[in-house]
C-alpha cells in the first residue's frame, strides 16, 4: 500500500530543495563577477536575472515550507533528484538569455549535461560566447562533479543528521570521515588542492604554447574543471584539439584519471595509504578494461591505416579511450571523425569503454569499475565452486579500502544497477535507431549520454528530435544519480496522485 | 484525482510544452564560403588527403605562435561574418579547420573572433592532412599563403532594456523575500514542529 505524502513531507522536501537552489544562486556569483571584470554587461544582467530567480525560489520555499522536521531516507532521495531538476530549470536561464540556445529545452539539456558531468551540449556558436557564460558552463560541471548537494552540505546544511540521506541520494555513499559534513569538506579539500595544482600546470603549458596570459589562465582553469569533473566541456568548439600539444594532452589524461578515481581512494592516498592505488579493485578493473579497449581500437585503426605512424596512432587512440573510459568526453579528433576515420570497431571499442566507466563515488559515470570487479569475482567464484568437490566451501573477497567478503547481497546490488544501466543504454540506442540514425552511432551516443561521458559522433545536435533531447536529459540524470533517487522521486509523484490518505 | 488537481496538472504540463517548444529561434543561417567546407573535409578525409585546398573562414580565438610557425583556427560556419550577439541566426555548431602556418603570415591577422570581436575573415591555401604525420595525427591544413578577405571588428552586445527591467524587478522581489525570511521569527507564526 502506498501512502499519500502528508503536508509535513512536502514542507521538509521543499525546504531542503530551496536550500540547494540558494546554493546554485550563490554559485552564479562567480560567473557574475567574471562578467563584471571583463565588462560583459549584457551577460551581467543575465546573471542578475538568474541569481534573483534562484533566490526567489530558494527564499520563497524557506518562507512557505517552514518546518523543523529533519529528513528521512525517502525525503533525502527525493530532495537529491528533485533539486537537480529545479537546478536545471533555473540554472538554464543564463544559457537561454545569452541567445545561443535554440530552445529552452536545449538550454536545460546543457545544464543537465553540465551538472551530471556529461559534456554533450546544444549551445550554438560556442566560440563567441562571453567569459561569464563560459565560466558558468565549467563551474556547473565542476560543482556537479563534487555534487550540488555536497556544496549545499558544506555551506548551508550545518550538520543536520538528515543531510547524509541527501548525500547518498546524489550517488555518493562513501563516508570518508564520521560526520557527513566533514566528509563533504574532505572532498572539497582534495578537489581544491587538485584545482590549484592542475590549473597552474595547464596555465604554464598554455603560456608555453603561445597563449596570452589571461586566456592561458582561463583555459587552464576551465580545462581543469572539465577534466577533473570528468565533464568534458572545453572553452572552444575544437575541445582539447585546440591546443595541438602532447604535453597539454598528457596533463589532461592525468587529471581525467585522477578525477575518475573514488574519493575514498583519494582520501586513503591523502592520508598516506599509497599502496591502495595498486590494490584497489576499481583501479585494477579500470587498468584492465582500458588496456583491452585501447588494444582493440589500436589494432583496428592500425589495420585500416588511418594514422601515419605508431606514435600518432597510440596518442590518438589512448587519449580518446582514456577520455571515454573515465567518462570525461574530451577529444582531440572531430566528432564525425569517429565515424569517418575510426569506423565501426573504433566506435564499438569506445562505446564499451564509456559503458563501463570509472570509479564509484567519484565524478565519473557508467557502470563503474567496482561493479565490474565484483561481477567478475562472482563469476570466478561460481567457476571455482563448479570444479571443486561438493563439500568444499569457496569464498571470495575483493579489496576496496579494506578487504570485503563477497556475498550474494553485494553481487545482487551490483547486478541490479548494471542491468539498469544496460537497459538505459539499450533504450537510448533503440530510440536513436528508430529515429533513423545508424545503430552503432545511436548506441555510441546513447551510451555516451547515459554514462555521462559526452563524446559525440555527431548524433547530438540542436536539430535532433525533441524527444531524443528529453530522453538524453533523463538518461544523464538517471545515470548520474544511479537510478535509486530518480525512482524515489517517481514513487513520490505516484504517491501524491495514487497514495492512500 | 480531484477535478481541480487535474486542471492544475494539465495547466502545468501545457505551460511546460509551450515554453519548451515555442521558443525556437527562426531564421536562415549564413551560407558557407568554401567549396570544400570544413564539414566536407571531415566527412571525406580520404578524398582530400594530401591535396591542395583553398579555405576561407573567420580567425578564432588566438594565434598560438611556436617558433617561426603558428596555429590558427578558421571557422567557416554560420557565424563567420556576424556572431549571435549581433543578430546572426542560429545555424548549428561552430565548424572549422586548424591551420599550421608561418608565424609572419599569422601576425597579419588583427582581430580574432570571440565574444567581443568578429575575427578577420581570411583565405588560406595549403595542403590538407587527414592525419598529419608532423602533428600527432591531427586533421589540419599546412598553409602557404594567407589573404585578409574581410577585416574583423569589435562586436556589439548592448544591454537590452527589457532584460534590465526584469533584472531590477526580480532582484527587488528576491531582496524582499530574503528580508522576510530573515525576520520571520519576529513577524510570522510559530514554525511547524515535526514528528
Image (spheres, coloured by chain):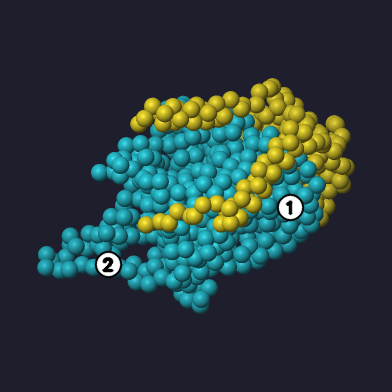
Chain colours: A cyan, B yellow
Residue holding disc 1: A33
* Residue B128 shows in this picture: no
Place residue A306 in its image quadrant: top right
Left or right: where does residue A285 sit relative to residue A156?
left
For image coordinates 73% across by 25% down, the residue present is: B30
How many marks the image carries: the answer is: 2
For image coordinates 43% across by 64% down, the residue present is: A161
Viewer-side residue, A186 vs A255: A186
Write down the chain letter for disc 2.
A
* Residue at the extreme bottom: A272
User: Measured from the top left, where is residue A405 in percent x and y?
Assistant: 29, 68
User: Measured from the top left, where is residue A266 in percent x and y?
Assistant: 51, 68
Relative to A434, say whether A34 is above or below. Answer: below
* Residue A189 shows in this picture: yes
> Of discs 2 and 1, which sits in the foreground?
1
User: Measured from the top left, where is residue B165 in percent x and y?
Assistant: 74, 36
Q: Secondary structure at mark 1?
A: helix
Mark 2 touches mark 1? (CB < 8 Å): no
For image coordinates 56% across by 59% down, the residue present is: A156
Q: CA distance from mark 2 to mark 1?
A: 54 Å
Quarter of the picture holding the N terminus of chain B: top left
Viewer-side residue, B107 vs B44: B107
Write down the chain letter for disc 1.
A
**Residues marked 2 and 1, same chain:** yes
User: Measured from the top left, where is residue A16 in percent x and y?
Assistant: 49, 53
Relative to B125, say whether A316 is above or below. Answer: below
Q: Residues within 10 Å of mark 1 (few under 14, many from 20)?
A: some
Left or right: where does residue A162 sit relative to residue A412?
right
Indicate which disc residue A396 carries: 2
For image coordinates 78% across by 44% down, the residue present is: A40
Quarter of the picture holding the C terminus of chain B: bottom left
Amino acid at each position: 500500500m502506498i501512502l499519500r505524502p502528508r503536508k509535513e513531507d512536502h514542507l521538509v522536501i521543499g525546504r531542503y530543495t530551496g536550500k540547494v537552489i540558494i546554493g546554485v544562486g550563490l554559485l552564479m556569483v562567480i560567473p557574475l563577477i567574471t562578467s563584471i571584470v571583463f565588462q560583459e554587461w549584457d551577460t551581467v544582467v543575465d546573471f542578475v536575472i538568474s541569481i534573483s530567480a534562484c533566490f526567489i525560489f530558494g527564499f520563497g520555499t524557506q518562507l512557505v515550507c517552514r518546518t523543523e522536521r529533519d529528513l528521512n531516507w525517502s525525503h533525502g532521495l527525493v530532495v537529491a533528484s528533485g533539486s537537480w531538476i529545479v537546478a536545471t530549470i533555473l540554472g538554464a536561464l543564463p544559457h537561454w538569455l545569452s541567445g545561443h540556445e535554440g530552445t529552452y529545452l536545449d538550454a536545460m539539456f546543457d545544464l543537465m549535461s553540465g551538472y551530471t558531468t556529461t559534456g554533450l551540449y546544444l549551445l550554438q556558436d560556442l566560440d563567441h560566447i562571453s567569459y561569464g557564460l563560459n565560466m558558468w558552463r565549467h563551474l556547473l560541471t565542476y560543482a556537479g562533479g563534487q555534487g550540488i548537494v555536497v556544496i549545499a552540505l558544506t555551506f548551508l546544511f550545518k550538520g543536520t543528521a538528515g543531510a547524509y540521506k541527501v548525500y547518498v541520494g546524489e550517488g555518493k555513499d562513501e563516508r570518508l570521515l564520521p560526520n557527513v559534513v566533514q566528509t563533504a569538506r574532505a572532498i572539497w579539500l582534495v578537489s581544491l588542492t587538485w584545482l590549484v595544482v592542475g590549473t597552474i600546470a595547464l596555465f604554464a603549458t598554455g603560456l608555453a604554447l603561445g597563449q596570452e596570459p589571461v586566456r592561458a589562465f582561463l583555459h587552464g582553469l576551465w580545462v581543469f574543471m572539465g577534466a577533473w569533473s570528468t565533464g568534458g566541456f572545453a572553452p572552444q568548439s575544437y575541445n582539447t584539439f585546440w591546443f595541438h600539444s602532447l604535453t597539454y594532452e598528457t596533463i589532461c589524461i592525468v587529471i581525467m584519471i585522477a578525477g575518475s578515481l573514488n574519493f575514498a581512494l583519494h582520501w586513503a592516498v591523502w592520508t598516506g595509504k599509497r599502496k591502495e592505488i595498486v590494490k584497489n579493485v576499481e583501479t585494477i578493473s579500470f587498468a584492465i578494461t582500458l588496456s583491452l579497449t585501447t588494444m582493440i581500437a589500436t589494432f583496428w585503426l592500425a589495420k585500416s591505416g588511418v594514422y601515419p605512424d605508431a606514435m600518432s596512432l597510440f596518442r590518438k587512440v589512448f587519449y580518446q579511450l582514456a577520455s571515454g573510459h573515465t567518462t570525461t568526453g574530451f577529444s582531440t579528433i572531430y566528432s564525425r571523425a569517429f565515424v569517418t576515420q575510426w569506423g565501426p570497431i573504433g566506435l564499438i571499442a569506445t562505446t564499451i569503454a564509456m559503458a563501463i566507466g570509472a570509479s564509484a563515488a567519484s565524478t565519473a559515470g557508467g557502470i563503474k569499475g567496482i561493479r565490474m570487479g565484483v561481477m567478475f569475482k562472482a563469476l570466478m567464484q561460481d567457476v571455482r565452486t563448479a570444479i571443486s568437490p561438493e563439500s568444499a566451501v569457496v569464498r571470495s573477497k575483493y579489496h576496496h579500502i579494506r578487504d570485503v567478503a563477497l556475498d550474494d547481497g553485494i553481487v545482487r546490488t551490483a547486478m541490479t544497477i548494471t542491468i539498469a544501466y544496460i537497459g538505459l543504454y539499450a533504450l537510448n540506442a533503440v530510440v536513436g535507431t528508430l529515429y533513423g540514425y545508424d545503430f552503432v552511432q545511436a548506441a555510441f551516443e546513447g551510451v555516451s549520454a547515459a554514462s555521462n561521458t559526452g563524446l559525440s559522433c555527431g548524433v547530438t545536435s540542436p536539430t535532433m528530435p525533441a524527444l531524443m533531447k528529453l530522453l538524453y536529459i533523463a538518461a544523464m540524470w538517471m545515470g548520474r544519480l544511479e537510478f535509486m533517487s530518480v525512482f524515489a522521486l517517481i514513487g513520490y509523484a505516484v504517491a501524491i496522485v495514487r497514495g492512500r490518505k | 484525482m480531484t477535478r481541480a488537481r487535474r486542471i492544475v496538472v494539465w495547466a502545468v504540463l501545457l505551460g511546460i510544452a509551450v515554453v519548451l517548444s515555442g521558443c525556437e529561434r527562426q531564421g536562415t543561417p549564413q551560407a558557407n564560403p568554401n567549396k570544400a567546407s570544413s564539414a566536407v573535409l571531415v566527412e571525406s578525409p580520404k578524398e582530400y588527403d594530401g591535396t591542395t585546398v583553398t579555405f576561407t573562414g573567420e580567425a578564432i580565438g588566438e594565434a598560438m605562435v611556436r617558433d617561426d610557425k603558428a596555429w590558427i583556427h578558421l571557422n567557416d560556419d554560420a557565424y563567420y561574418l556576424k556572431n549571435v550577439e549581433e543578430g546572426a541566426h542560429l545555424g548549428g555548431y561552430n565548424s572549422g579547420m586548424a591551420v599550421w602556418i608561418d608565424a609572419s603570415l599569422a601576425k597579419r591577422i588583427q582581430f580574432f573572433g570571440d565574444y567581443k570581436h568578429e575575427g578577420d575573415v581570411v583565405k588560406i591555401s595549403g595542403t590538407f592532412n587527414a592525419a598529419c604525420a608532423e602533428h600527432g595525427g591531427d586533421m589540419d591544413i599546412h598553409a602557404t599563403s594567407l589573404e585578409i578577405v574581410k577585416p574583423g571588428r569589435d562586436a556589439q552586445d548592448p544591454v537590452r532594456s527589457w532584460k534590465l527591467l526584469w533584472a531590477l524587478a526580480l532582484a527587488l522581489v528576491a531582496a524582499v523575500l530574503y528580508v522576510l525570511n530573515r525576520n520571520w521569527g519576529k513577524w510570522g507564526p510559530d514554525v511547524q514542529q515535526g514528528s
